[in-house]
Image (cartoon, grey):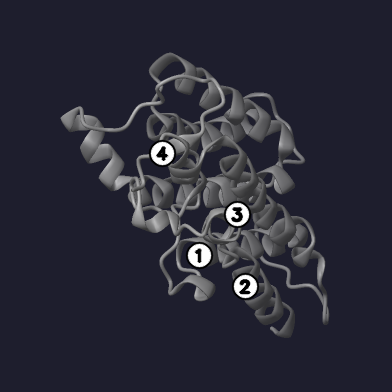
Amino acid sequence: METIAVIVLLSYLAGSIPGSLWVGKVLHGIDVRNHGSGNMGATNTFRVLGWKAGVLATLVDVGKGLLAAGVIATIRLGPEIHLPFWTPSVFYQMIAGVSAVVGHMFPVFANFRGGKGMNTSAGVLFAITPYSMWITLLVFVIVLLSTRYVSLASLFAAVAFPTTVAIRKYVFGIDRLDASIFVISVLICFGLIYAHRSNIGRLLRGTENRVRHFRPSSGMRGRGELG
């Protein structure tokens, strides 16, 4: 149990690193939560501060997931826990990953006002099954380019990952994919859909923000819209 406690704590703290908030304050003295959608995520950082800050925030958020599931999850302070239908290494990666995503959504370093966890979840899943994530990323890009809605692309990606895992494991028989990955990815999918509930409402009303173009943008700050 000591192993799980340490992994959960360290992964939560890693996930709590508020990349978008710190990038905005360090580079421009701006709290992104006070502008745009009000969300502390990379998408809003792109919208408010431009592509350079947005890319940096994205790297931090994805990196948190990779750190948790790829590094912190390897900590062992005693014998591994063996559960039915779980590969021990995957079990620890999932524990670390979920803790990091919770940390991103409710960060202790930012008054528990975080983002929606999409990029951090992507980092976690890249660490666990990169091939499935590359397919999911392709789905995200296709939907984004065809609709210009980041939120809609994120929702499609959230559904695409467990679907991809299921097809690879149960249709193509890729045994190295632990069944628990599919179960947890479904839970993550529902969690991400819940986190995007406000976006879903705006999509249904036709008021969701769309990407204006795919050229590097200077954001609201560069256009002088922050006052």
Q: Is the residue under label 1 in contact with that under label 4 (CB below 8 Å)?
A: no
Say what secondary structure mark 4 lies in: helix
Nearer the observer, disc 4 or disc 1?
4
Residue at 69% in and 43% down: 126
* Amino acid at pointer 3: Leu
- Picture quadrant where residue 213 is located: top left
* Amino acid at pointer 2: Leu
Q: CA distance from mark 3 to mark 4?
A: 15 Å
Near mark 2 (Cα within 10 A), the count class, few <14, some 14-19 or many ≥20, is many
Q: CA distance from mark 1 to mark 2?
A: 10 Å
Q: Earlier in the sequence, mark 1 or mark 2?
A: 2
Question: What residue would you read off at disc 1?
Answer: 102
Residue 175 higher or lower than 13, as above or below = above
Going by the picture, which residue comes out furthest to the bottom? Answer: 2
Q: Earlier in the sequence, mark 3 or mark 1?
A: 3
Q: CA distance from mark 2 to mark 4?
A: 30 Å
Where residue 27 is drawn, which disc sits there?
3
* Amino acid at pointer 1: Val
- Picture quadrant where residue 220 is located: top left
Asked if residue 167 shows in the view, the reply is no
Nearer the observer, disc 3 or disc 2?
3
Say what secondary structure mark 3 lies in: helix
Q: Nearer the viewer, residue 157 or 225?
A: 225
Q: Earlier in the sequence, mark 4 or mark 1?
A: 1
Residue at 61% in and 52% down: 61
Question: What residue would you read off at disc 2?
Answer: 13
Say what secondary structure mark 2 lies in: helix
Residue at 46% in and 21% down: 143
Residue 189, how many percent across, how many down? 45, 45
Q: Is the residue under label 2 in contact with that under label 3 (CB below 8 Å)?
A: no
Q: CA distance from mark 4 to mark 1?
A: 29 Å
Question: What residue would you read off at disc 4?
Answer: 220
